[in-house]
Amino acid sequence: MQQLQERDDSVRKPGIWTVVLASSAGTVIEWYDFYLYGSLAIFFSTLFYPANEPTAAVLISVATFATGFVVRPLGALLFGSIGDRFGRKSTFLMTLILMGVATALVGILPTFETAGYFAPIALVVLRLIQGLAIGGEYGGAAVYVAEHAPAKRRGFFTSFIQTTATVGFFLAIVVVLTCRLSFGEELFKQWGWRIPFLLSSVLIVLSIYLRLKLSESPVFEELRKGGKTAKSPIRESFATGHGMRYAAFALFGATAGLGCVWYTGQFYALYFLQSVLKLDFLTANLCLAAALVIGTPLIVFFGALSDRIGRRKLIVTGFILAAVFYVPIYQGIAAAVAAQNFVLVTALIVAQLVFVGLVYGPMAAFLVELFPAKLRYTSLSLPYHIGTGVFGGFVPLISLSLVAYTGNIYAGLAYPIAIAIMSAAVNVLCFPRALAGEREPATTGLPIEAN
C-alpha cells in the first residue's frame, strides 16, 4: 500500500476527463464480468444443473446469479475500509484484478455433464468472489471521480460512473450475442459460451494499464498528509447513532429503491421476456440491447440536471413513476410480444430506463455528498451494496418465484413496486430526521473537502 501511495506523489495529476475515462473503463469491465452470468442465467440452467427439472433448474440458476449479490456488502466493508485507510486508487486496482481472475476461471469450468455437482459448487464460489470484488469497486470509483470533480458539475461527472453498470450489461449482451450468432447454437453450447468469460482477461489488463496512470484522490492525499485518515472506518461509520442514521437513510430512502428500479428495468425485463413470455433468446436480447443504447444517455442527462435542480427531487420522481407505471408497461410488453411488435417492446423497456436515469443518474453525487471524506468509501459502499445487491439483486429471483407461485405473470412486479414506494416515502418523510436538521446534501455546490 505504502509503495503505491509514494508512487502516486510523483505522478502528474490527471485532468478530470482522464479520471473519468480510466475510472469508468475499469468499472465497465467489472460490471461486464459480473453481469455475464446474468445475461446467460437461463442458458446456464442447462449446463450447470440437472436437466430433469427445467423450472427448478432455471430458478436455481437465477439464484446462483443472486449469490454474487449476497456478498457484495461484505466486499463493501472489506474494500471500503481499505480504501478509507490506504487510498482509493490502490483499492480499486485490487478489486479489478480479483474480478478478472474469477471471471476467467468461470470460462474454464467443467459443466454438470462432465463434473457433476462440482460444477455448480465451483460456479457459486466464483460468483461469491465476483460479488466481493464488485462490492469494493463501485464505491471507490464513485468517490474517486467525485473527489476530482468541480462541485457545480459533480452530478454530471459522477453520472459517467453510473452508466458503467448499464454499459457493462450491454457489453455482456453484445459479446454473448456475437459469439452465439458466430458459432451457432450447437458450438456455442459446447464451448462458445466460454469465450466471453476468457475475453475478460484482455479487458482487465487494459483497464489496469489505464488505472496505473492515475494519481491518488486529492481529497484523500490531504487527509493522509494531515494524519486525518480513519483508523477504524467500519466502527467510525456505523457504531454511532449519527452514522447509523445516515446509513439507514441512504439504504431505505435511496439505494433499496434504486436497486429494484435498475434490476426491474433491465434484468427482470429480459427474464420476463424469456422465461415468462417464452420469447426466443435472440429477439429478447436484441430488444434489450437496442433499449440500452437509447436509454443509457439518460443517466448522464439526469446526472447533469441534478447539478441544476437538486438530486432528491429527481430520485423521488423516478421511484414514484416506476411504482405507478410498472404494471401497465409490462401489460403492454405482453401484448406487444403477442402481436410480434418488437419495436413497441423496445420502447416499453426504454420507458423503464427513464425511471433508471432519474434515480441512478444523480445517485453517486448524492451518496458522496452525504458522508464525510475520511469515511465515505466505507459509509456509502455498504448501504449501496445492500440496496442494489440485496434488495435489487434479488428482484429476478423473487419476481420469477412470485410468478411461478401465483400463476399471475404480473405478480412479480409487486416486489419492486413495494420497495420503490418505501424508498420514496422514506426519502420524503425521514430526510430531516436522518440528518438531524443539517443542510440538505442534494443541492448543488456543497463542499466535499477532507472534512
Image (spheres, rainbow, N blue to C red):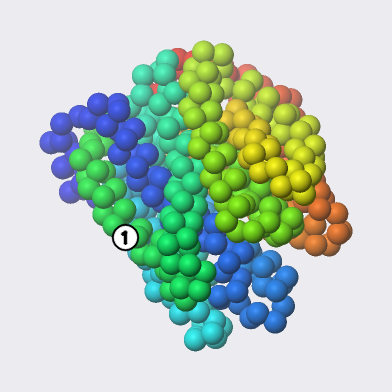
Q: Position of 443 compared to 248: left or right?
A: left
Quadrant into which the C terminus falls: top left
Residue at 40%, 35% (x, y): give it: 143
Side of 230 relative to 62 (left or right): left
| Residue at 62% from the left image edge and 52% from the top image edge | 284
- On screen, 406 above or below 12? below
Determine whether, in the image, residue 212 is placed left or right of residue 186.
Answer: left
Q: Position of residue 232 (x, y in %)?
A: 42, 46
Give percent across and percent down for residue 305: 52, 18
Identify residue type, mark 1: Ser
Q: In the rendering, at what x and y percent does residue 271 appear?
A: 66, 55
- Which of the 4 quarters of the picture holds residue 100? bottom left
The picture places residue 394, in percent across and down from the top left corner, at: 66, 54
Question: Residue at image x 57%, y 56%?
Answer: 282
Q: Quadrant of residue 418?
A: top right
Tell me the residue that label 1 is attached to.
201
Nearer to us in this view, 343 or 313: 343
Query: Is 142 placed left or right of 38 in the picture?
Result: left
In front here: 419 or 110? 110
Residue that lies at the very extreme toward the front in this rendered image: 340
Q: Specify few, some or many for label 1: CA neighbours under 10 Å numbering under 14, 14-19, or 20 or more.
A: many
Q: Residue at x 68, y 25 (%)?
A: 317
Establish if 436 lies above or below 21: above
Work out whether residue 232 or residue 354 is closer to the camera in this orientation and state it: 354
Query: Dot 1: what SS?
Result: helix
Q: Is residue 34 visible?
A: no
Instruction: Using the image as rendered, state which of residue 319 and residue 107 is in the foreground.
Output: 107
Q: Residue furthest left?
A: 10
